[in-house]
């Protein structure tokens, strides 16, 4: 039996609840404590999982947990991750790695110097459909991948604490918060550095650049087309579609066929949900805990997640300026 790994969860919001649930499927892993400064939130989540509630990262660290799981808004990722790494803990940090490239560089330096492992929650790599498609590409089933299209569209998510998702300075809007999944998946499957990004976006009541279409060129010549939006009707739910085209074939899937359930209420309202939604998190966390026990390597290295962040930020810059961003030289202003 592997030694027990104890976990401290930083943040008690939406995704922290999903992680806490997924720990239950991870043998030898125990959630010890949950930290959140908003009164009542840590108590509620900790209570559901037999854990202790605290208010701060410092209190979590003082409990001696082996792993810190950072599930807070992106603007707090760098400070929390660096502090937990410097305290000698393993860290799983939710995507995006950080809000800015300067913060990401700070995290990369801390990870380099620390004894613990750092992995980033780019969970699209673990969604069974996405993982299966990537395995088929790796096996050569569609020849050389030349074009990848990834679309995620939904209404403005309404759950975030004090509405941080609706504040572009914190979330980066859909191009960063949601698009970083698409850019990460594309970069991972194409397996070549992104060299150029062009993006057009339109505003909506959900905020600036909440309808967005980006195209990316990779060093090996492949291209990706990423669409994301937070301005679609709420009744339609979260929609995802993907297409991978290579020299010898095409792979495609969408959430309409694979993932989602819909609840139609008698009053005419409908509610969509991902009926199998926890499965990618169970795989992601299981892989991370296995890597902690094995002494590495991290399943999603922070350097790869930083490249995905860079493409998303480059897309935002392109949407703002109307110009193509040369990612081989671009630095975030
Ligand atoms: N992988 C995915 O598919 C996915 C989905 C949703 C969110 N996320 C990511 O997870 C992170 C959290 O998002 P969320 O939707 O759960 O947001 P949320 O607003 O529901 O929860 C965030 C929680 O963090 C708490 N918090 C803020 N600063 C803190 C601090 N310094 N210490 C402790 N707690 C703090 C807030 O009070 C809040 O309860 C974000 O980075 C987001 O991008 C990932």
Image (cartoon, helix red, strand yellow):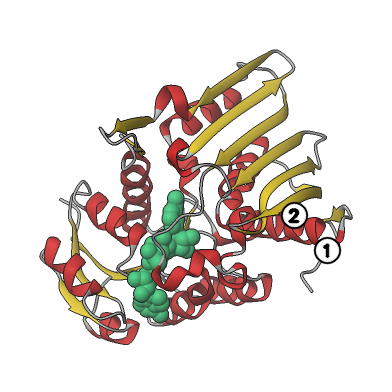
Image quadrant in which you'd find residue 37: bottom left
Q: Secondary structure at mark 2?
A: helix
Residue 236: image x %, image y %?
Answer: 46, 36
Residue 21: image x %, image y %?
Answer: 23, 52
The image's mark for residue 315 is: 2
Q: What quarter of the picture does the C terminus occupy?
A: bottom right
Which residue of the protein is positioned furthest toward the front in this rendering? Answer: 267
Residue 291: image x %, image y %?
Answer: 38, 53
Residue 40: image x %, image y %?
Answer: 21, 76
Picture quadrant of ligand 1 = bottom left
- Is residue 117 found left or right of 212 in the rendered image? left
- Is residue 323 found left or right of 74 in the rendered image? right
Identify the residue at horizontal 42%, vertical 58% (top origin). Answer: 158
Identify the residue at horizontal 60%, vertical 60% (top origin). Answer: 173
Identify the residue at horizontal 74%, vertical 47% (top origin). Answer: 193
Q: Which residue is mark 1?
A: 330
């Amino acid at each position: 039996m592997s030694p027990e790994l104890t976990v401290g969860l930083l943040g008690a919001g939406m995704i922290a609840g999903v992680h806490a649930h997924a720990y239950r499927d991870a043998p030898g892993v125990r959630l010890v404590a949950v930290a959140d400064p908003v009164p009542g939130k840590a108590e509620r989540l900790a209570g559901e999982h037999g854990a202790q509630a605290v208010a701060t990262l410092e209190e979590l660290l003082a409990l001696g947990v082996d792993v810190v799981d950072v599930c807070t808004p992106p603007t707090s990722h760098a400070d929390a991750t660096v502090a937990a790494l410097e305290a000698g803990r393993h860290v799983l940090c939710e995507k995006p790695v950080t809000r800015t490239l300067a913060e990401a560089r700070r995290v990369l330096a801390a990870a380099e110097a620390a004894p613990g492992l750092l992995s980033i929650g780019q969970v699209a790599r673990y969604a069974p459909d996405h993982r299966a498609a990537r395995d088929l590409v790796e096996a050569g089933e569609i020849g050389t991948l030349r074009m990848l299209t990834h679309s995620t569209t939904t209404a403005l998510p309404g759950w975030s604490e004090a509405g941080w998702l609706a504040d572009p300075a914190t979330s980066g809007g859909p191009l960063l918060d949601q698009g970083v999944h698409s850019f990460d998946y594309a970069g991972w499957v194409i397996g070549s550095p992104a060299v150029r990004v062009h993006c057009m976006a339109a505003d909506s009541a959900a905020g600036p650049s909440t309808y967005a279409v980006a195209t990316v060129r990779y060093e090996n010549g492949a291209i990706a087309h990423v669409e994301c939006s937070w301005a679609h009707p709420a009744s339609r739910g979260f929609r995802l579609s993907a297409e991978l085209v290579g020299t010898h074939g095409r792979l495609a899937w969408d959430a309409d066929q694979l993932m989602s359930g819909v609840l139609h209420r008698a009053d005419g309202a409908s509610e969509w949900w991902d009926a199998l939604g926890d499965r990618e998190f169970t795989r992601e966390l299981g892989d991370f805990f296995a890597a902690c026990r094995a002494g590495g390597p991290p399943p999603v290295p922070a350097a790869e997640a930083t490249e995905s962040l860079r493409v998303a930020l480059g897309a935002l810059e392109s949407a703002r300026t109307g110009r193509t961003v040369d990612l081989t030289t671009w630095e975030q202003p």
